[in-house]
Image: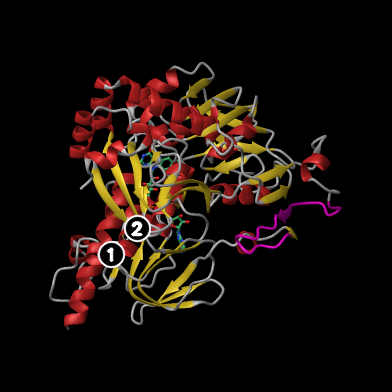
């Protein structure tokens, strides 16, 4: 329990009346911390703290590494910036040794300053110092130096893939286009003589990374050179989760936090389809929407903090339904007690001549957020009439000169949410061409034009195009799964009652809701046969899958 005397002994509270100190002592929480424990996590809700005993460090996650950026001694307060500006904590405050802190909630603090305005002034002055001081928040705002330099052309598909991969894995990098006038200065040294994609990894002692230059590295090589996790730490796991989209990451968070030896294996980068969404407007708790990249990056940090192992650039090529062996590309084999299929769906291909040849050279599936800046002042086209196409159009319209949505049907109403249709109407550089399809894609080395077929007039017209983004839905890619796992005619995985209905269940007990036709193998998110294909549903199912894993393991242990 914090006493009024302890509060009065803190410098910033020293001038408060004894009755105010008494009042504060009645609402202040008395918190004991072990070394390494957070008093306030980065991004935590605002509150005012004072350090009573011990030592607290301010810690900031910079480019994936935690750095100590400040310190508090007994008698100091922290949280003055969030409480004054009404923001979340920009850094974490963590006990460097056994410590004791008091915490005053925001509404209690505001109740007191209403009566003691001088306290608000004193706390505000400290906040101002923290923002502007030599070791203040301003210093934190300085951009972190790049971890890699990428030299490659705008329309080089390998360069495009690598840029997307680095973005999605939150690796800060500098991209140098060889034909830029100042390419030499940007690259920082003599330009390599090799033509094509070159990557220079910057030495980083903290991560144990050495400076190295690689010519056309595969994504896996790039991941290894950057120190991203690509190999499993052990061979036996309670649960192996296939795919790190929202469903797989949610399963990773719950599995690891509930004490299961958990590994999530992702063939590309964490985030799945959601990671390619420029703005998810309907995910609970984000009133102004959240970009898929941001959501994925938060989920990734959460899963890693809770102890899930997450491998990137590794594809699961085969699973054995009988032995529960999971075979990764490159030969690693894991032994899983349970398996969670969270492998989502893949973009449906546009069956139009030229698309494959110009893929990554102006033609793209999906609409990576980072691609928008490359459409500056161009006329771009989006194929599709669903919400993802609408979101992409909104995002690209802030960079491109014009965005044309090509829609096969009579209008967007049947397939796009009303709020998005209304938003599109407010952007003068977005137009919608109904009953229109892409008939051909043209260009020698990069996309130059597309042919648009207008079903109403029956005419096909060529138009210049600076980018074609195809968002025409997705299909389950499950042909690699063993035949014991029952699928529907379109390749979606059957679970729970659908397995029984298909007569593919052999045990006496019913299959759990997310259990496939193989007991102990579960499916969640978009890959599962189900009517809802949404981030919230994927997250919910990923978390639920872990509850069924526990049930299954209990049952297996009992038998
Ligand atoms: C552009 C776009 C915008 C969207 N906007 C919204 C929105 O605003 N609101 C909303 O609710 N939903 C939205 N969605 C839908 C939402 O993103 C999906 O429903 C959700 O991502 C499904 O999550 P998932 O984890 O099941 O699958 P996915 O997100 O598809 O993730 C599956 C992951 O598994 C990996 N994988 C596949 N096979 C293997 C393998 N063999 N080995 C290893 N890894 C593998 C993939 O690489 C992928 O990363 C949008 C989708 C797109 C494409």
Disc sitting over residue 303 in the figure? none
Looking at the image, is 379 positioned above or below residue 530?
A: above
Looking at the image, is 386 positioned above or below residue 38?
A: above
Question: Residue drawn 17% across and 76% down?
Answer: 507
Looking at the image, is 324 positioned above or below residue 143?
A: below
Return the x and y of residue 222 as percentages of the image width and height.
64, 59
Left or right: 410 as drawn, with respect to 4: right
Question: Residue drawn 23% across and 26% down?
Answer: 111
Looking at the image, is 407 positioned above or below residue 200?
A: above
Disc 2: CA contacts within 10 A as few (<14), some (14-19) or many (>=20): many
Q: Quadrant of the C terminus?
A: bottom left
Left or right: 34 as drawn, with respect to 5: right
The yes-or-no answer for disc 1 within 8 Å of ligand 1 is: no
Residue extent of the magenta highlight: 192-211
> In the image, is residue 320 part of the stretch drawn in magenta?
no
Left or right: 526 as drawn, with respect to 132: left
Check contact, mark 2 vs mark 1: CB within 8 A: no
**In 3D space, how far apart are the residues under numbered discs 2 and 1 (Cα atoms)?**
8 Å
The yes-or-no answer for disc 2 within 8 Å of ligand 1 is: no
- The part of the image, by quadrant, that contains residue 252 is bottom left
Question: Residue drawn 22% across and 31% down?
Answer: 18
Provide the residue designation for mark 1. Answer: 258
- The part of the image, by quadrant, that contains residue 387 is top left
Tell me the element at label 2. helix
- Residue extending farthest to the left is 508
Comparing 479 with 124, the one in front is 124
Return the x and y of residue 516 as percentages of the image width and height.
27, 66
Task: Specify how the rendered protein is coloured.
Answer: secondary structure
> In the image, is residue 208 part of the stretch drawn in magenta?
yes
Is residue 412 in sight in this rendering?
A: no
Q: How many marks?
A: 2
Provide the residue designation for mark 2. Answer: 253
């Amino acid at each position: 329990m914090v006493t009024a005397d302890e509060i009065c002994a803190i410098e910033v509270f020293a001038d408060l009346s004894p009755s105010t100190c008494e009042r504060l002592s009645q609402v202040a929480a008395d918190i004991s911390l072990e070394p390494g424990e957070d008093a306030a996590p980065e991004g935590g809700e605002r509150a005012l703290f004072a350090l009573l005993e011990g030592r607290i460090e301010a810690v900031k996650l910079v480019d994936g590494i935690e750095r100590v950026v400040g310190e508090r001694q007994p008698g100091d307060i922290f949280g003055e910036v969030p409480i004054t500006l009404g923001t979340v904590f920009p850094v974490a405050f963590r006990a460097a040794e056994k410590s004791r802190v008091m915490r005053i909630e925001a509404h209690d603090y505001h109740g007191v300053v209403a009566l003691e305005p001088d306290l608000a002034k004193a706390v505000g002055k400290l906040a101002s110092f923290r923002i502007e001081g030599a070791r203040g928040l301003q210093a934190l705002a300085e951009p972190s130096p790049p971890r890699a330099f990428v030299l490659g052309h705008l329309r080089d598909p390998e360069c495009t893939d690598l840029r997307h991969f680095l973005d999605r894995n939150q690796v800060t990098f500098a991209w140098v286009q060889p034909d830029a006038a100042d390419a030499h200065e940007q690259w920082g040294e003599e330009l390599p003589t090799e033509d094509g994609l070159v990557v220079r990894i910057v030495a980083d002692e903290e991560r144990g990374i050495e400076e190295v230059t690689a010519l056309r590295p595969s994504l896996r090589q790039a991941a290894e050179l950057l120190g991203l996790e690509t190999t499993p730490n052990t061979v036996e796991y309670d649960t192996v989760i296939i795919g790190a989209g929202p469903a797989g990451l949610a399963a990773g968070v719950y599995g690891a936090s509930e004490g299961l030896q958990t590994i999530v294996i992702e063939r590309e980068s964490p985030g799945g389809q959601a990671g390619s969404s420029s703005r998810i407007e309907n995910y609970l708790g984000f009133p102004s929407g959240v970009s898929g990249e941001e959501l994925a990056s938060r989920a990734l940090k959460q899963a890693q903090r809770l102890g899930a192992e997450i491998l990137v650039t590794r594809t699961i090529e085969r699973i054995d339904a009988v032995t529960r062996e999971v075979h990764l590309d490159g030969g690693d084999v894991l032994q899983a007690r349970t398996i969670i299929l969270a492998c989502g769906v893949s973009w449906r291909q546009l069956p139009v001549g030229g698309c494959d040849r110009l893929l990554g050279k102006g033609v793209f599936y999906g609409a990576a957020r980072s691609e928008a800046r490359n459409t500056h002042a161009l006329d771009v086209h989006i194929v599709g009439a669903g919400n993802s196409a609408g979101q992409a159009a909104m995002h690209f319209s802030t960079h491109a000169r014009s965005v044309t949505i090509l829609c096969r049907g009579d209008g967007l109403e049947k397939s796009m949410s009303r709020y998005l249709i209304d938003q599109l109407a407010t952007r003068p550089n977005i137009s919608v061409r109904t009953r229109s399809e892409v008939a051909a894609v043209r260009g020698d080395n990069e996309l130059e034009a597309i042919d648009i077929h207008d079903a109403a007039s029956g005419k096909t017209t060529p138009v210049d195009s600076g980018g074609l983004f195809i968002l025409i839905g997705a299909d389950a890619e499950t042909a690699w799964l063993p035949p014991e796992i029952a699928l529907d005619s379109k390749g979606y995985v059957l679970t729970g009652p659908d397995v029984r209905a298909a007569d593919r269940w052999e045990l006496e007990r019913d299959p759990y809701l997310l259990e496939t036709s193989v007991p102990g193998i579960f499916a969640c998110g978009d890959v599962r046969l189900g009517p809802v294909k949404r981030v919230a549903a994927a997250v919910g199912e990923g978390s639920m899958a872990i509850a069924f894993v526990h049930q299954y393991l209990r049952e297996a242990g009992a038998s």
